[in-house]
Image (cartoon, helix red, strand yellow):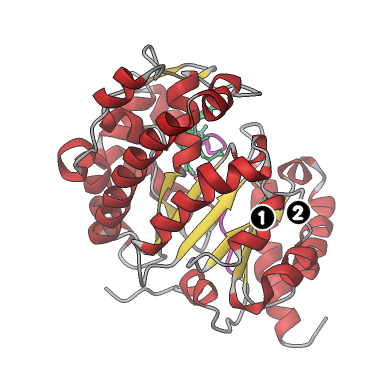
Amino acid sequence: MMLKNDLLLRAARGEDTERTPVWLMRQAGRILPQYRALRGRLSGFKELVETPELAAEVTIQPVDALDVDAAIIFSDILVVPEAMGLTYEMVEARGPLFPETIQNAHDVARMRIADPEEHLGYVLEAIRVTKRGLNGRVPLIGFAGAPWTILAYMVEGHGSKTFSKARRLLYTEPALAHELLRKITATTIAYLQAQVEAGANLIQVFDSWAGILPPHHYHEFSTRYIREICEALPGVPVTVFAKGAFFAVPEFATLPCRTIGLDWNEDPQTVRAVVGESKTLQGNLDPCALYGTPEQVQHATIQMLRRFGPQRHIANLGHGVYPDTNPDNVKVFIETVKEFSTLAREGQI
Ligand SMILES: Cc1c2[nH]c(c1CCC(=O)O)Cc1[nH]c(c(CCC(=O)O)c1C)Cc1[nH]c(c(CCC(=O)O)c1C)Cc1[nH]c(c(C)c1CCC(=O)O)C2
């Protein structure tokens, strides 16, 4: 089906666009009252993720409510470890928990390379239902966690400031870590290819815990697997978002991906100077900028747009929007991107 709004895809491919496309990480859920109302009627997060009609409804909510230029499928990166054999629980107000974790060679051997239709069919069906519901209004983004970030949860068992159990494994049992990373990578590649087949127009890889590794470990245990994922998706626009990995930007410039996501610690002009003109950059307003007055939000957004320049930019936050953000300020952010980037191209400002 032809897309009515394909700004995101054209910007990712490096084509000139009449304005800068905009969406927000974690736009589905959390901040929208209509999400909270639906979520309140359900037993929990997993029911929502595993019921394709409901996941599709929540995916489309921000397109209706915020007028963003893309939808992102409502799911979680932790569906991948579950498909491999490690069930997760979502503890209300605390986050994910794995009752069993990966500790030794026996545990790694027990993990299977998942079959997307068999073990993640509910996500693929949610993508198909979402595509019908979107009816070509905007592109749909599919996603997965980067293998390193997935390993971190599988070994640690829950969120952590340091992920010291996961980092310890890289020193004490590097071969075992690689074996697990290979299985996660194989599962992720098949899963992302299936997402594209189901209708995802662009793929984002989230390496949320990139920033806790030293650069040499990041190169050895993360970038090489991200590279394999990018290589397995030829022709698909891929965005690599690695939080805290400013040290890896020179290497990201060599990845066969279209877009590099920046967190708010990164300076767009510095990154641009390193990667050159061959990549699109995404980001990177500090989510805390959305706590200001509407005028302050507008000011911060315009400053961010100026740092990126008009082309080869996808406007976004530097990480997911915080749950207590006023949706009206999110709208100011989105409208400012649309208006200012249009005027900038017309030479009016
Ligand atoms: C709290 C949490 C969850 N899952 C996870 C956490 C973080 C735990 C920690 O701090 O260590 C793990 C997770 N899930 C996702 C990521 C990668 C993106 C990131 O760094 O934020 C990570 C690190 C993607 C996601 N996780 C989710 C999406 C889809 C929603 C969207 O992007 O709009 C994505 C891309 C949805 C999700 N996932 C979760 C909830 C409650 C929701 C729905 C509403 C909300 O955002 O609060 C649970």
Residue occupying image coordinates x 67% and y 58%: 249
According to the image, label 1 marks what residue? 262
In this rendering, the answer to whether 104 lies above or below 228 is above
Queried whether the magenta region covers residue 27, the answer comes back as: yes
Q: Position of residue 153 (x, y in %)?
A: 47, 26
Most extreme residue toward the left is 118
In this rendering, the answer to whether 40 lies above or below 185 is above
Q: Position of residue 349 (x, y in %)?
A: 83, 81
Q: Which mark is residue 82?
A: none
Principal secondary structure, stretch drawn in magenta: loop
Mark 2 and mark 1 in contact? Answer it, CB < 8 Å.
yes
Identified by mark 1, the residue type is: Leu
196 sits to left or right of 349: left
Q: Position of residue 259 (x, y in %)?
A: 55, 65
| Kind of element beneath mark 1 | loop
Quadrant housing the N terminus: bottom left
Residue occupying image coordinates x 34% and y 21%: 105
**Magenta-highlighted residues:** 21-33
According to the image, label 2 marks what residue? 266
183 and 55: which is toward the camera: 183
Badge 2, how many Cα within 10 Å: few under 14, some, many 20+? some
347 and 88: which is toward the camera: 88
272 sits to left or right of 231: right
| Quadrant housing residue 163 | top right
Residue occupying image coordinates x 25% and y 23%: 110
Queried whether the magenta region covers residue 326, the answer comes back as: no
Residue occupying image coordinates x 55% and y 79%: 14
